[in-house]
Amino acid sequence: MKLYTTIIIILITILGAFAQIDQDTLKIKEVVISAMRSEKNKNEIPVKVDLISAKNIENLAVVNVDDIFNSISNVYVNRSWGPFSKNSSVTMRGLSSSARVLVLLDGMPLNMAAGGSINWHMIDADNVSQIEITKGPNSALYGNNAMGGVISIISKRPKSPITVHLNSYGGSYKTFGQHITITGNRVNDEKGLYWGIKGFARQGDGYYFESEASRDYSDTTTYIWEYNTGGYLGYQFNKDNKIEVSGDFYDDLRNEGIQVYEKDGSYYKFTTKTIQANYVGKFKGFEINAIGYRKQQDYFNQKERLNNFAEYKLMESSSTDIDEGVWIGVNRKIGEKHFFTFGSDIKHGETNYADIYFTSYDEVYYTGAFNFYALFLQDEYNLNKKIKIVGGLRFDKANFYDGSFSVNNPTSETGYENSMHSEYTPETWNAISYKFATNYSFSEKVRNYFSVATGFTPPKLDDLCRSGKISKGIKIANPELQPEKIFNIETGTFITLHKLEIEPSIYYSRGKDFHYLVGLGDTVDIGGEQRALLQKQNVSDVEILGAEINVKFQINQNLNLITNYSFNHSTIKDYKTSVGTELTGKYLAEVPPHLFYIGLYFNHKRLASSIAFRFIDEQWIDDENTLLVEKYSIVDFKISYQINKYFASYIDIQNLLDVEFVDRKGLSSPGRFILVGIKTDVKQISKKK
């Protein structure tokens, strides 16, 4: 580990010396981003930010929108079943759990308060204009869920009077899909309406988890169907003021690969509804951005199986999760040197969950709710043309209430001896998050940033209130769970030479009262099977030492090389317990120490193609570091051809070499996955007056 640290420090030092070298440079274009909750040039921001444009996305083999992040350093995507996965987990900077990465869609947070998860399936990559990935804690601006970073997804908006986009495809495992977007823009002289309607549908037969030799009559394929529809309507009053309302509906069904008697066997189903209103405007020197939203996610899981004694088991799990909130941000430039950002967040989240057993009498219920309140302030101070200093402060207040857990008519299926009902004590947590960062521009070619920041995340409703079966065992609710915090210090350098960009960075993080799933040192008999007892607890001290380096090189006019490497050493520094196993010195589960990516991108006239190699290192999947998922490598390929101005064809191939690997649950991946498609784009050109 010391060797890695030394190498990165030396690399940053040497690269910093390029500030004095006189070579031809290629200036980085100004790109509007939201890392500072205001529009900024990327070169002005003292933080590590990766930008992905719609053109970049077109060059990648993308089946689901989270596939895009496979090309980004220090972002780990776990989607081992490909498009047939229940969902995807996206983590950053050596932190396990996707709940530690805040995901925004046009400013609306997608993380659910119940468990912090994101429904990645509902986002259509065809409608994405830009993705902004801000790495490291950003709780000083965004509060909870932003401990590892922020992913901001910005949707396309129309520029032509009428645009029609179609994407039709078919491929492996009889997967077929159709995407459609129709948009209009009637803005004239900076005033008028714009609108859009969109939707997609996809289905696939899926694949068998078990080999043909080991299958029995209960094995089936992981088939899916899903559809999405939505739209938006906006009105621009003038060049500085506009308002927009949007809505979205998503529904799906995903089989788990088991079917005994019931129609569709064991399956998951998510129904997600969102509505959002945005206002952007300027008034007497103040820039105002306000967002109001409401999300409802209805979850249903039918689970049937034969246990180890060939006994048939059937149960259903369901929940309704509701998140809603209002965010108001105000920007104001004061004098020539200060740019202030201040505002408030108000959020509410609640969950109602039920497990109903049909081959026994058990019923399990839990409820819980959160209210969040926050005030934040940030000042960007331009000391001179070379140095920018940023300071941010945020106060968060979280109220947990209406928490309860009930068991009715228990049997050995749930392990409880008697019916019970528990009302959890309401809790209130306060937190102050801060950030201090500097950006120093040696020249137009080289700049360096330094940042110190903290992060804060309250417990999830699922961890506070729910006891029940999970894939690793039996999870026990922990109503005593406290918020987790993180301290992070980092530095990085950005070098832009002729056709070459190099971006190394190094960081050190300490997590306090870290939320971590640990074994309680005991098992319980559930329907004749011994299952480990687990609980989300506060781990006193977690340490993460990490580094990353990005390199982009324009080989010639038509060929570009992009490569990156990430390293994370994530360990438990202190965790002593009277039950279970001593975990001090253990590695954090579900964190691969090494990630590597290299891709070649070719564009010439109507032809475009890319080939990319990615390496994912081995990782522990349990708290005691006894179970290991082996490392693996994947090659992805894409080729597309613009037939004429209306039609383009493409072939996406994920896992070109058909590598077989096993996921955290011991289940196999789908192997090579191919899609062949046609895209159609028709635009009405504006007439010049």
Image: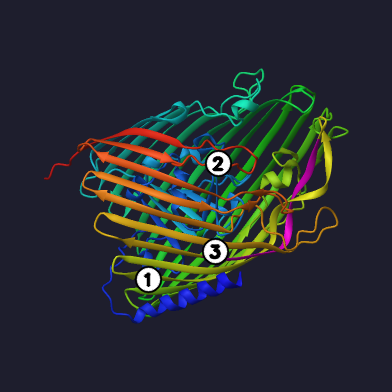
Name the residue located 46 percent from the left edge and 74 percent from the top edge.
12
Does residue 659 sit above or below 7 in this rendering?
above
Disc 3, SS:
helix
The first of marks 2 and 3 along the sequence is 2
| Image spot of residue 580 (x, y percent) | 82, 53
Mark 2 and mark 3: Cα distance apart in space: 33 Å
Looking at numbered disc 2 in the image, what kind of residue is underneath it? Ser
Mark 3 and mark 1: Cα distance apart in space: 27 Å
Disc 2, SS:
loop
Residue 194, picture quadrant: top left
Q: On the image, numbered disc 3 is attached to which residue?
A: 140
Q: On the image, numbered disc 1 is attached to which residue?
A: 495
Disc 1, SS:
strand
The first of marks 3 and 1 along the sequence is 3
Which stretch did the figure color magenta? 530-547
Magenta-drawn stretch contains 540: yes
Residue 80 got which mark? Answer: 2
